[in-house]
Image (tube, rainbow, N blue to C red):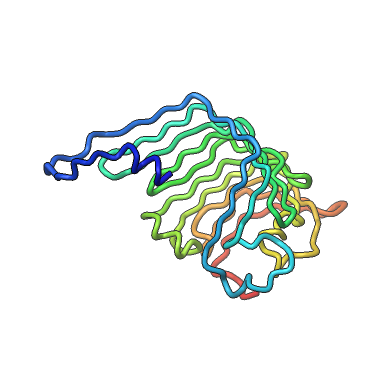
Amino acid sequence: LDFIINYFASSDTVDDGLPAPPFMLKVKQVDLHNVHYKMKLKQSASYANLSHGVNISQMDFLDVDGRLKNVQVGIDAGHVDVLCRFVRFYALERSGFCLRDLSGDVHVSDKNISFQNMELTTPYTHMLSNINMDFDGWESMGDFCNNVVLTAVFQPGTVMSLQDAAYWAPMALWGMDEPVELDGVFYGPVGSMHAENVHIAFGTSSRLSLDAFIDGLPVI
């Protein structure tokens, strides 16, 4: 990417004091085939000796395959907006976590990420939801649990498996594989979460209906 940017960059670096004109890139369709995505960040001490689950700072997705439509990237006065439609998306993480399919409408800006009409499928999970995250800027992600306001609406028909969740929180959940039926609304920062009109079903006959407020996070 740096090579492409530098290749087309202008040699004229004189600042005329005028704001840059708005930039817009529109792509009708993007197809991904056999893509390998690897992230290498500073290793967290809590993941240094991880024997199972996803190592978040060293994520490694193989065989990425997908189709995105109506991709739109806009830049105006330093603010970036990205819109696209995920038609299908498959990826396999080296830990064994498999994202079998993902579809929905995505919007990303410097103050918001939303995924509407999302349908996510793994071998054990089928999630129907609308997810929205509001924040003051990308620096807010440094304290995700307190600075990012989530709104998650889970539709009836959602089945979430603890086996999938365990890949992302292996120290707390590894070994659990209970499927949980879930619908309802969750909103607020993760560290101060509200739940409304939530229905949970698990096991052969266990059912919960609740409104709740969760303040703080447990120390595991």
Residue 87: image location, x then y, percent? 60, 30
Q: Position of residue 99 (x, y in %)?
A: 69, 45
Residue sitting at x 65%, y 39%: 34
- Quarter-of-image position of residue 83: top left
For residue 167, which quarter of the picture?
bottom right
Question: Where residue 114 sits: x, y (%)?
Answer: 49, 42
Seen in the picture, residue 8 relative to 169 is either above or below; the reply is above
Q: Residue at x 57, y 41 (%)?
A: 130
Can I make out residue 119 in this image?
Answer: no
User: Which residue: 57% across, 62% down?
Assistant: 57
Furthest residue in direction top, as rendered: 28
Q: Nearer the viewer, residue 60 or 184?
A: 60
**Residue ID at (65%, 74%):** 220
Taking 115 as reference, is 17 left or right? left
Estimate the x, y position of residue 84 in percent, counting from the top left. Answer: 49, 33
Image quarter for residue 126? top right
